């Protein structure tokens, strides 16, 4: 997966307190999760998740799954469907 902040690749297992080896930012955060979906309840596509105040800070969400590679946010995927070309 890629760090949400510095965009550099991170290898290995992501634990609750894992930090990016490149920039030192928390990695187990909503913005690095494949379920992060701005606009959905709690900005998460998993129903019933607990409220997370800061999407850029470490959390203890049990549903966290790292985004694969540099996957764009869901809203960008949706908008790309309507591009000309």
Image (spheres, rainbow, N blue to C red):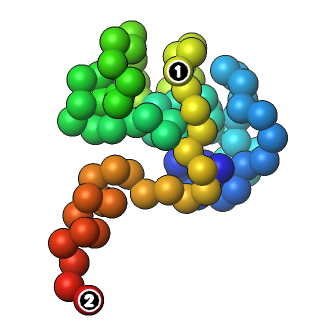
- x and y, in percent, of residue 2 in the image: 62, 53
Q: In which quarter of the image is residue 35?
A: top left
- The one nearer the camera, 56 or 69, is 69
Q: Residue at x 71, y 32 (%)?
A: 14
Q: Quadrant of residue 39?
A: top left
- Could one spot residue 56 in this view of the protein? no
- x and y, in percent, of residue 46 in the image: 38, 24
Position of the C terminus, as image quadrant, is bottom left
- Could one spot residue 83 in this view of the protein? yes
Outermost right residue = 12
Q: In which quarter of the image is residue 42?
A: top left
Q: Circle 1: is it few (<14), some (14-19), or many (20+) Cα within 10 Å? A: few
Q: Which mark is residue 11?
A: none
**Up-down relation of residue 14 to residue 4 (above or below):** above
Q: Residue at x 53, y 21 (%)?
A: 63
Which is more N-terminal, label 2 or label 1?
1
As measured in the structure, the alpha-carbon distance from the residue carrying label 1 to the one carrying label 2 is 37 Å
Residue tagged 1 = 63
Q: Residue 85 carries which label?
A: 2
């Amino acid at each position: 997966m890629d760090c949400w902040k510095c965009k550099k690749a991170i290898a290995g297992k992501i634990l609750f307190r894992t930090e990016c080896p490149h920039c030192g930012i928390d990695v187990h955060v909503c913005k690095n999760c494949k379920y992060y979906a701005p606009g959905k309840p709690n900005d998460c596509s998993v129903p019933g998740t607990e409220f997370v105040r800061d999407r850029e800070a470490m959390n203890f969400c049990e549903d966290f799954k790292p985004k694969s590679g540099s996957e764009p946010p869901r809203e960008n995927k949706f908008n790309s469907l309507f591009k000309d070309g």
